[in-house]
Amino acid sequence: MQPKYADIMEWVAVNIFDFYQNLNQFYGVLAECCTQQSCPAMAAGPALNYTWVNQDRKSVQLPAPTYIDYVMTWVQNLLDDDSVFPTKAGA
């Protein structure tokens, strides 16, 4: 729940950052079990495969560890971008 005197955008940003950190630690535990050989595709069951859109705007299927690495890197880049998540007071 948002604290009474907290700015809504700052509160959301802090919670997104915390969620990202927790997710990153959680994946660190699973990384030993999910290798390129054991998880050749990023999927949620037999009917749903996740794909990555490459620089040529083409959808490509990646092994799960590679897909997760790409997603986590993309999110980290957003978190590091001051135009998306400002770090200076009043921004």
Image: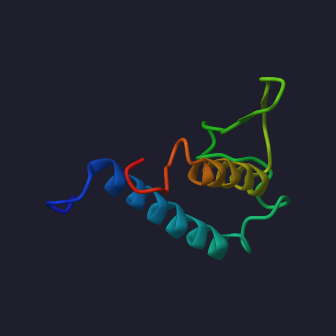
Q: Which residue is painted at 73% across and 49% down in the image?
A: 70
* Quarter of the figure with residue 72: bottom right
Numbered circles on residues, count = 0
State how the image is colored: rainbow
Q: Nearer the viewer, residue 79 or 91?
A: 91
Q: Is residue 26 above or below residue 5?
A: below
The correct choice, above or below, for 40 with respect to 52 in the image is: below
> What residue appears at the point 67 percent right and 47 percent down from the top-left corner?
74
The x and y percentages for residue 89 are 40, 56
**Residue at the limit of the structure toward the top, as seen here:** 57
Query: In the rendered view, does 45 fall on the left or right side of 37?
Result: left
Q: Position of residue 68 (x, y in %)?
A: 69, 54
Q: Can you name the residue that lies furthest to the left here?
A: 4
Residue 52 locus on image (x, y percent): 73, 37
Quadrant of res 32: bottom right
State which quadrant residue 2 falls in.
bottom left
Q: Locate the N terminus and report the quarter of the image it occupies.
A: bottom left
Q: Is residue 60 left or right of residue 27?
A: right
Image coordinates of residue 22 in percent, x first then y, are: 50, 69
Tell me which residue sits at (66%, 73%) in the image: 28
Instruction: Decide: is 16 above or below 81.
Output: below
The residue drawn where x is 46% and y is 62% is 19
Front-most of residues 91 and 52: 91
